[in-house]
Amino acid sequence: MTHVLIADDDSKIRSELKQVLEKNGYNVIEAATARETILQAQDHEPDLMLLDIKLPDMPALQLLEELRSESALARVPIMMMAENADNELLARTFRWDIVDFLHKPLNTDLLTAKIGAHTRLNQAYKFSRKLSKEMYMSRIERLEIEMKANEEDLSEAERHFTWMQPKPPQIDGYDVDLLYRPYGRLGGDFYDFVWLDRDRLAVVVGDVSGHGIQAAILQAMARKLISLALRQENGDLHRVVAFANRELTNDLPPGSFVAAIVGILNTATHAWKHVRCGIPYPLLITGRESDSVVTPGGPLGLSKKADWHVQVGEYATILEPEQSMMLMSDGIIECYQDDEKKKDFDVEGVMKAVKETRPGERFIATILEQSDLEARADDDATIICISRR
């Protein structure tokens, strides 16, 4: 049965919508506040969410951001409804990939038709993606069986893989610290340092879906594509990710994607800017205190929309003395800490390690120690920390 979550602080509207939708065969979940909406969505993972744009306890954009930050809810269709919506606010909600907007009072016939269309499309997408993934994984499994038959070739590939990893640059007034730990012999994480001119250094951290040989092949392609885009577009970050997304969408196997963050440091002015595409939020560290830098942006290689890049947010700041920018893949935050429950190290663990780093020591060394990454890793892990002295 299709599950629809209705979020509106008006119980009369919820009741009317529930009656209409249940009559049409939908299972309805209700929420009266934004916080309740998040909890109900986490518990039930609905097939569609119908949200009022003005819930009382949280701005609409914050609610959408929190819903989209949940991996299980990132692609659930969301329809917004409002009686009198500010056009600017409405336009900004579409950056979080809402699929439709409805004016109150609602036309129930039109509403049920739209819900039916969006849920059918969502279910078709899920089935198509599942089928594509199964076909792709079947081909990969055959490839891995063949590769495992020749240990010597695999060892040679591992040596080349290690040799190809770039070295952190030496920059006057800065420390560039790096952690790169493939989970197996070959990894799906990647990173890069690209000088665009004498002063501008581009920094990339990426993570290809999957593991092992196929991920290593795809990450090498993704790293080279982003490097090419940086040079071709002269550091225009939105054009860079638009180029990379277009090429990856055409070249990646079905169901695969690339999560990445691309930043540029001007070593003369200390200006920093970045765009984030589906990878964990970076941390801006001041002294020993750290804050997540939250910007919207989905993974590369999933959308063929020509204007896909407009949804990607850009962050810019000036790195002051004693400030650091830390970029990371999800391997470190998903490093399990409990043998039974596999509790993740999570962003809070990273922040705690940063706060407890002793004077004169590097943040990454403390993170590595407190996460027990060498013993607890469940995925590739990459961290780059750029610190201004």
Image (cartoon, helix red, strand yellow):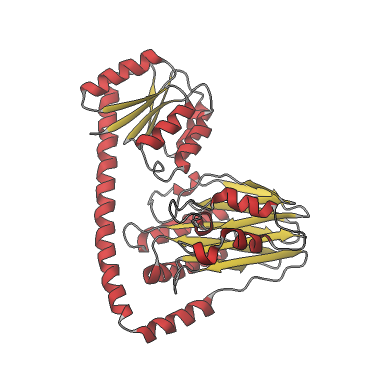
Depicted 232 relative to depicted 78: above or below: below
Q: Name the residue rendered at 56%, 55% in the picture.
A: 237
Q: Name the residue rendered at 42%, 57% in the picture.
A: 246
| Residue 109 in view | no
Could you say where residue 261 lies in the image, as x and y percent from the top left?
54, 56
- Residue 4 lies left or right of residue 199; in this view the side is left
Give the mark count. Answer: 0
- Residue 112 lies left or right of residue 358; in this view the side is left
Q: Name the residue rendered at 66%, 65% in the picture.
A: 177
- Residue 106 lies left or right of residue 162; in this view the side is left
Depicted 306 relative to depicted 67: above or below: below
Q: Name the residue rendered at 56%, 62% in the picture.
A: 372
Could you say where residue 25 lies in the image, as x and y percent from the top left?
21, 27
Quadrant into which the N terminus falls: top left
Task: Find the residue positioned furthest to the top.
Answer: 12
Q: Quadrant of residue 322?
A: bottom right
Q: Quadrant of residue 30?
A: top left
Of 342 and 46, the residue lying toward us: 342
Depicted 69 relative to depicted 275: above or below: above
Q: Quadrant of residue 38?
A: top left
Quadrant into which the C terminus falls: bottom right
Of 85 and 11, the residue lying toward us: 11
Could you say where residue 213 lies in the image, as x and y percent from the top left?
38, 72
Of 158 and 204, the residue lying toward us: 158
Could you say where residue 73 lies in the image, as x and y percent from the top left?
40, 41
Of 363 and 92, the residue lying toward us: 363
| Residue 319 in view | yes
Task: Find the residue positioned furthest to the bottom.
Answer: 152
